[in-house]
Structures are given as C-alpha cells and as structure tokens.
Image (tube, rainbow, N blue to C red):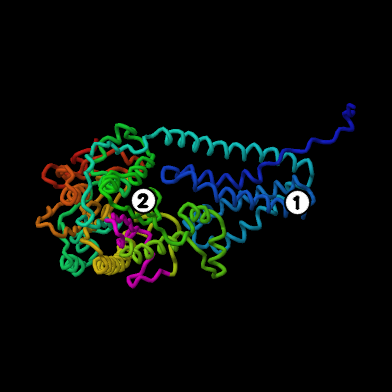
Amino acid sequence: MVVPHEQARPCRPWLAHPVLFAWAPVLLLYAHNMAELHLGELLLPLLLATAAALAVWGLLRALLRDGTKAGVLASCFWLWFSSFGPVHSLATRLSELVCPTLLLVYALAWPALLVLALDRKWGARHVSAALNLMAVGLVLFSAARIGVYEWRRARAPASALSSGSLPRPAGARQGEAPNIYFLVLDGYGREDVLHDLYHCDNRDFLRSLEGEGFQVAPRARANYAQTALSLASCLNLRYLEELPRLLGPKATDRTPLGRAIDNNEMARFLRASGYRIVAFASGYGGTEMRSADSYQRGRAGVSEFQSSLLEITPLPHLMRLLGVTGETDAHTRARQVLYTYDHLAQAGQSARPVFVFAHIIAPHPPFIFRADGSLKNDLPSAGFQDDTDLLGGREAYVQGYREQIEFITARTRRAIQEILARAPRPTVILLLSDHGPASRLVLYDVRQTDLRERFGILLALRLPGKDLRINDDLSPVNACRLVLREYLGADLPPLPSRSYFSNFDAPYRFTEVTDAQGRFRPFGPSGTKGR
C-alpha cells in the first residue's frame, strides 16, 4: 500500500558521526606519526573510542529521549574533548592568565551553544546530516593516507639490508664460544663532549671499565645521527648506502630500518653459529628485536602513542587539578629501563652461547630519572623529542641530561659487574651509544649542528682472550665486524670510518660529514654541502 505523501513519516537520519568523531583523532594522530608506528597500535584505541562513543550517546539519549539530538550532542562533545589539549597548549603560549579559566569556559561553552542550536527538532536533523558528512570526510581522509602508506610499506623489501652474502660459519665449538652482550646507551656522549659541554666527569666509570678488561675508544664517533639508522647499520655490519637507491632520498618510512634491526645480519650469523638470541624491549618500536629466541619485556603499560592521544584530551589536566597522578608512557619507559638492568646478568645463564641485545633509551630524553635513580615528580608527557626547544631550552636540557647520565652511568657499571660475576663462560661486551647528546643539535640543519657533540659517542669493547688494540676512532659498524671476525672467523675486514648526517624528515638523504682522515668537514655558508 502506498502511503499518501502528506501522511509519510519523516525519514530517520543516518547516525554515524558520534562514533566517527571518536575515531577521527585516533586516525589523525596515527596518520601524522605512521612512519614510527605499526597498525597494531590502532586496535585498542579504536575499540575504546567506539565503546566510549556509544556509551556517551546512550547516556544522552536516555536523558533527552531523542536519538538525533543525543547524537549531535555526543559528536560535539567529542570535538570538544579531542581538541582540548591543542587549545590548552595555544592558550599557555599566548597568556599564562588564560590557563586557570580555560577548562571552565571551554567546558561550559559547547552545551550552551547546543541548547540554542537544537531548540527545534528539524534543526537537530539538519545538524546531524552535516556532522555525518564532516565526520565521514575526516575519517576517509586519514584512512586513505594510512591505506596508501601501508600499501607502500607492504611492498618494501622484508629487509633492505639483507644481502645474504655473509658466509655462514661451520659452527663454533660451544665450549669455546663466548657470550656476546650488545649494550646500547641511547645518546651517551663521549668523555670530551661530556666534560666540555655538560661539565660531567665520567673518568671513574671509564677507568672501572678498563679494570674489567674493556678498551675504550677515546675518539669514537657514530656512523649516523639517528638511532634507527645507527642500529640498522651496525647490526647489519655495513653502511646504508643502498637505502636511498631502494627507497628514494625523499622517503620518510622507517619501517625498512625496523625490519633490518629485527631481522639483522649479526643475529642471523650468530644463530647459525649455535647462539641463542636474547633481546630486551626498549619501548621504542623502531628498534625492537622481536624475532629473538627470547624477547623480554617488563610489565606492559601506556605506550607513547596512547599517551599522545591522552594529551589531546582534558583528562591529564583534570587529573593534575585534582592532584591525581596517572600512569604515563614515561612510567612505562622507566620500568622497562630498570627491568632491563635487573635481568641482564640472568640473560647470559644458558648452556648455549648467548647473544644479548639491549637498547636502553637513556640518557636520551625524556629526562625522567634523578641522579639517585628515583623518578622525577613531574614526569614529562609522551615523546622521545631530542629538541632543546621542546625540552625547555639548552640550559634545561643540560641539567636534565646531567642528572640522568649520572644514574645511567652508575647503573650500567653495576650491571656489568653483575654480568661478569655470574658469567658461565668468557663474555664479550660491546658497550656503545648510537649517537651523542643533542643540546646543540638542530634537527633539520647540519650547518647549525655541533657535529662533535652529536657524533661523539661512548664505545668500549671487552675482548677476552684477544691480544689486540682497537682504533682510537672506532665506530659502531666496525666494532661489530671486529667481534665476529675475531671470535667466529667471519670474513669482515674493517670498513672506511664514515659518519653521515640526515634530517629527521628525510632520514635517507645522507650528508657525509667526515673526510678521509676522519675529521669533521666544515659546514656553513662556505662549507661542504650534502648530497
């Protein structure tokens, strides 16, 4: 039966925007940082956002007895909720006087405006239709960016640095094969850099290392200025010259670096030699070796991505106003650092020789530890920023770094003593940093960066049973080659010692900053330009 036109009931509007607006900030933040993340990071935030969106809409619907109005109110709530953090940050920069009243004004403004806008039912339907279009557009925009990026990521080689050219050993006799520890202290500076720029004296630490059989390279320098580049290079025993050709110099995707670290040449060679691979989680997704025979991590907590999502909402600000201390990714990071130190010695207890990889995100920012190892009261929010402008300026960076390096130095010294005291077999230890500190780093300009600070690193080797002297300017890639050459007979002669700088936004656009004699090239208006 055809219903007469004048008796037809109005079409119920499609109501998707409350959930889509809850998804939008998750997808936008992921799309902005997807070069550092993996799709799995999206699952939990999207599930929680969906549940929260439905709960808010259901509550408002029960109160208003009108699903359309409830949906509009719910969507406007999510727009307010997910924009509070950026608005608060802007207000903080503009005026300190705005901040105490911002939360109250912002919380009252949106319901007052909505009451005026939705006083008629037809108004709610039209607003709902407009919000649907807006929400679909936002979600599709982010989803398209993520989809294209993931498609390109899937087409990238599984390991761009896996040549398979390294000859496999026949197998070292297990009774003679040493345990090998590869310990990376992220951003730990060289002795002269710490003395001149940070007024830190770590000579007692270096002397204690020498007393334990280490050799310290006094002029050691990093091969690359960024963590993922440095670790991918040394663990794969070569420079990264083929990556600009394979990926393009303008590429931003760091996934190939993560794959090259996870499935690296050094671990494959050692596994083929009868070694068991043990890796500790770092908390920095791009440097994890999850393919290890034993991948160890402490109690799971808030990730950097999840903490960044929380920071765009009013929840952290409300908690601070109420005096409530919540869990942040800084707590997770601190627990993981302490867990790694506490379990390093135990990792070497095996009937088989063991290769232990531990990347400790310290003394690199954020500066969360005091000199005595206790956590600071006001822990920083999410991020591994190495930018002095974001960390309170150069003076604040130096102060935070000095405190943190004092703790890391003492804790590393104790961990090495524990490793050697409990070692069931001879133990080789590579103790190094991936790059130096960053008080004078300009992320996007090699000409303004202090290269000695950024490339001057700690590098110490313990080579039991070997009567040889390491080079004063040894770099990480050659340190790894040396260990495999001396202890497992790998055909890995030393490579020319080189150092490369690249901008954070263009990690594969390398500028060689050293000459044939190992000196830093001059940069500036008349200096050497990068290629």
Measuring from the top left, give residue 178's x and y in whole percent.
Answer: 22, 57
Instruction: Kindly report which numbered mark, 1 or 2, lies closer to the viewer in this rendering.
Output: 2
Residue that numbered label 2 is attached to: 292
Residue 61: mark in rendering: 1
Q: Amino acid at mark 1?
A: Arg
Residue 71 falls left or right of residue 383: right
Q: In the rendered view of the protein, which quadrant contains the N terminus? A: top right
Residue for point 88% across, 26% down = 2
Residue 260 showing in the rendered view: yes
Dots 1 and 2: beta carbons under 8 Å? no
Label 1: few (<14), some or many (≥20) within 10 Å? some
Residue 445 appears anywhere in the view: no
| In the image, residue 215 lies in the stretch drawn in magenta | no
Secondary element under disc 2, as helix, strand or loop, is: loop
Say if 350 sits above or below 148 in the image: below
Q: Which residues are magenta?
A: 348-376
Q: Position of residue 355 (x, y in %)?
A: 28, 54
Please identify the quarter of the rendering in which residue 503 is found.
Answer: top left
The one of 490 and 514 positioned closer to us in this rendering = 490
Task: Decide: is 227 above or below 363.
Answer: above
Q: CA distance from mark 1 to mark 2?
A: 51 Å
